[in-house]
Image (cartoon, helix red, strand yellow):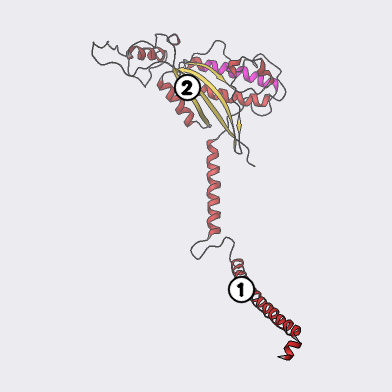
């Protein structure tokens, strides 16, 4: 005891040193244990990586070959895209190829004259001296710079639109509106143009047109059907149908009985042939008081239709 008392400081320092040594050993043991666990996990992950690297790209199994499936699906997608492009045939420009001012002026005159004759042959009434939305260009021989190409494309598309309406044998074509593509369009009548704009995405350009015509329901159905079955791509984006005024049809399609409406239809078709959509008209006697009333009456319609032409962009 005497020795301890004489060397108390030394004893206390030794005890503290032993405590610190024990704490250091415990800390080193825990750190070594964590390192051992991390080493085991690292070896496991490395083994998994080596296993994946030794397998084919996009690994499958004995029953499924993902690489072959992906290639087959890519071929199917490419084949579908190729077949789908056949439904988006562009309308030929008029004239085609390199366009000069003289060539376009001549083509415009011929096309307008041709459409006027086709309208007469199909018994379709046109506005007087109608130029099919090209009133600003009809008298010109020189055209604004850079406008001949877009004008030639529009002339081809307008011709296709008009012929589609003529083929349905509507009563009257009141007008076709297109977007402005030339500085010369500033001098044209407002009724020749629509304020809509072309829409472009990664695949195509959609060019809007507005066509207004008068017809009965069978002709309207034929117009829509012709657009749907055309080899060119038409999108009917909007359609407005309203009864035409009584002054728009001879014989008054606004007459109070169904027989008079049918007679108005045959008054038009009689110039060429009988419409297959209706039987010969017969007089419909007025119902007696308390009798059956007419609930559906055929009448002349005024149709305004917004149509978009879809032109695919060239393949990249």
| Image-based side of 215 in relation to 146, left or right | left
> Around disc 2, counting alpha carbons within 10 Å, would you say few (fewer than 14), some (14 to 19), or many (20 or more)?
few
Q: Is residue 121 magenta?
A: no
Q: Which residues are magenta?
A: 98-118
Quarter of the N terminus within the rendering: bottom right
- Where residue 141 appears, as percent x and y from the top left, is 70, 16
Q: Is residue 222 above or below residue 316?
A: above
Marks 1 and 2: which is nearer the front?
1
Residue 35: x and y in percent read 65, 73
**Disc 2 on helix, strand or loop?**
strand
Given residues 272 and 9, the one toward you in this image is: 9
Q: Is residue 23 left or right of residue 206?
A: right
Residue at horizontal 55 percent and vertical 50 percent from the top: 75
Residue 94: assigned label:
none
Q: Residue at x 75, y 83 (%)?
A: 9
Image quarter for residue 50?
A: bottom right
Residue 112 lies in the magenta-colored region: yes
Q: Where on the picture, by quarter, is residue 53?
A: bottom right
Question: Mark 1 to mark 2: distance in Å?
Answer: 76 Å
The residue singled out by tag 2 in the image is 240
Relative to 59, say whether 303 is above or below: above
Q: Secondary structure at mark 1?
A: helix
Q: Residue 8's spot in the image, x, y percent?
A: 74, 85
**Circle 1 is placed at which residue position?**
37
**1 or 2: tag closer to the N-terminus:** 1
Q: What is the quadrant of the C terminus in the image?
A: top right
Q: Is the residue 184 above or below the residue 90 in the image? A: above
């Amino acid at each position: 005891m005497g020795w301890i008392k004489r060397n108390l400081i030394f004893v206390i320092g030794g005890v503290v040193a032993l405590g610190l040594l024990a704490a250091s050993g415990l800390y080193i043991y825990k750190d070594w244990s964590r390192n051992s666990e991390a080493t085991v996990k690292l070896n496991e992950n490395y083994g998994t990586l080596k296993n994946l690297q030794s397998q084919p790209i996009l690994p499958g199994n004995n029953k499924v070959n993902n690489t072959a499936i992906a290639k087959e699906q890519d071929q199917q997608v490419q084949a579908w895209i190729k077949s789908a492009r056949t439904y988006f045939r562009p309308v030929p420009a008029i004239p085609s190829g390199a366009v000069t001012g003289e060539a376009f002026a001549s083509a415009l005159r011929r096309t307008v004259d041709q459409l006027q004759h086709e309208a007469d042959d199909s018994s379709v009434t046109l506005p007087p001296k109608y130029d099919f939305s090209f009133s600003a260009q009809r008298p010109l021989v020189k055209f604004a710079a850079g406008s001949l190409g877009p004008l030639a494309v529009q002339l081809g598309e307008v011709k296709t639109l008009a012929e589609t309406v003529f083929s349905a044998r509507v009563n009257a074509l009141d007008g076709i509106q297109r977007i402005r593509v030339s500085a010369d369009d500033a001098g044209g009548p407002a009724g020749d143009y629509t304020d809509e704009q072309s829409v472009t995405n990664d695949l195509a350009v959609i060019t809007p047109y507005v066509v207004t015509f008068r017809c009965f329901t069978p002709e309207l159905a034929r117009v829509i059907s012709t657009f749907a079955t055309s080899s060119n791509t038409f999108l009917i984006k909007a359609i407005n149908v309203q009864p035409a005024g009584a002054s728009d049809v001879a014989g008054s399609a606004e007459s109070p009985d169904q027989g008079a409406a049918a007679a108005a239809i045959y008054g038009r078709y009689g110039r060429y042939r009988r419409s297959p959509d209706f039987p010969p008209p017969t007089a419909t006697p007025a119902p007696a008081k308390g009798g059956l009333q007419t609930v559906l009456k055929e009448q002349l319609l005024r149709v305004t239709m917004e149509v978009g032409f879809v032109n695919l962009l060239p393949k990249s």
